[in-house]
Image (tube, coloured by chain):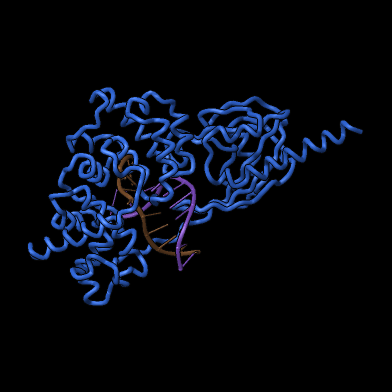
Chain colours: A blue, B purple, C brown
Amino acid sequence: MTPVAKKRFHASLLGWFDAHRRSMPWRDTADPFAIWVSEVMLQQTRVEAVIPYFLRFMAAFPTPAALARADSFDVLKQWEGLGYYARARNLQKAARRVMDEWGGEVPVDRAIFRSLPGVGPYIEAAVGSIAFGVPVAAVDGNVKRVIARLLKMEVPVNGPRAHAAFAAPADDLLCRARPGDWNQAMMELGARICTPRHPDCGRCPAAAFCIARKESCTDRLPVRLRKKRPPVRRVAVGAVIRGNRLLICRRPETGLLGGLWELPGGTIEKGELASGACVREIREEVNLRVEPVCHLASVRHAYTHFTAAIDVFVCRVVSGRVRLRGPTDFAWIQPSRWVQYPFPGANRLFMPTLMAYFETQNTKQNDYQRR
DNA sequence: AATTCGGGGGC
DNA sequence: GCCCCAGAATT
């Protein structure tokens, strides 16, 4: 793109952005911490999904100091349902480093900010440009798609070389007078106009500069590598009851759903019955001998790289005392109190059914007592 | 370079 | 069902 064309492109896109920018809670604030939090929440997550989480999170932890001194349990509870829980863990770690090493001020220095946990190339550029006016292009999924069409680039956007391939033209196109607005405008364009399917080229402020538009190949761009579809993993979990208490366990700090609470259980091995796996897993994980009382529910839940098919059994304790082997903590809770703990979405699918089960039991017990 | 990390919305 | 989303860490 010639310098003259680039100047017209800047004016056109920024003019569109100024006129049509959506209102978001993290816009119209100059607080670098708020902008940082929003960018962490926004990775791989839609704007609409983030808004309520952002508002609650900033109300609970308005500053790096507040986040640094918070209990990680409360941070995880705030993050419950948003997914990618390492983001929350890393954000709090980073806030603690900001307190310890930088007096509570978000570092302006790019290399220092980039070195904080959870801060990668995108977040560094996004926070740097939006909060501090650093002239660097933020390259996310939207920007890659927009540039792929604009410049007719056929490098796969989800391939290994994507970031390097798209960062260079993104930096070249950057409007250095308004880097923060420019980056947001490019992303907003990708989210609202230059969408993955059926882009609205008629209303696109970049249409006059778009090679794919000129050559009628917008629907063939961007190029994307096929991913093999994730396998199904069968899982059995137990609602272990003792008296009127329910056993819940806390997952290891790292890995899938790190730090969240759940009903104990695990993978069903080949040729194994779901109920058998439930009994075995509970013996292995918490050292309790249990016996299935009834099959409560079957649910499916799709994760990024596998689909879980979960069978839930109500179990009674036969013998043993809890001794943890996989989980990092456990609690015998009043069943209705489960909502106070951060739970994965897959568990939230069947917990209402379990609550209804308890209601039925109580009703039966009451009926019995009345007779 | 490839995998592992959630969950929800669109079609 | 499949695709995609204001990506980063890990191996």
Q: Is residue A187 visible?
A: yes
Q: Residue at x 28, y 53 (%)?
A: A140
Say if A95 sits above or below A23 in the image: above
Quarter holding residue A210 = bottom left
- Farthest-out residue, front: A19
Residue A225 place in picture, x, y as percent: 33, 63
Say if B10 sits above or below A118 in the image: below
Residue A361 place in picture, x, y as percent: 77, 38
A206 relative to A368 in the view: left or right: left
Q: How many numbered discs, if any?
A: 0
User: Which image quarter holds the C terminus of chain A?
Assistant: top right
Q: Residue at x 61, y 26 (%)?
A: A322
Q: Residue at x 59, y 40 (%)?
A: A265
Q: Residue at x 24, y 73 (%)?
A: A213
- Farthest-out residue, bottom: A215
Say if B1 sits above or below A115 in the image: below
Q: Is residue A326 visible?
A: no
A38 relative to A332 in the view: left or right: left
Residue A45 place in picture, x, y as percent: 39, 50
- Farthest-out residue, right: A371
User: Which image quarter holds the N terminus of chain A?
Assistant: bottom left
A277 relative to A204 in the view: left or right: right
Q: Nearer the viewer, residue A146 or A227?
A: A146
Quarter holding residue A319 = top right
A182 relative to A253 in the view: left or right: left
Residue A283 place in picture, x, y as percent: 62, 34
Say if A206 sits above or below A62 in the image: below
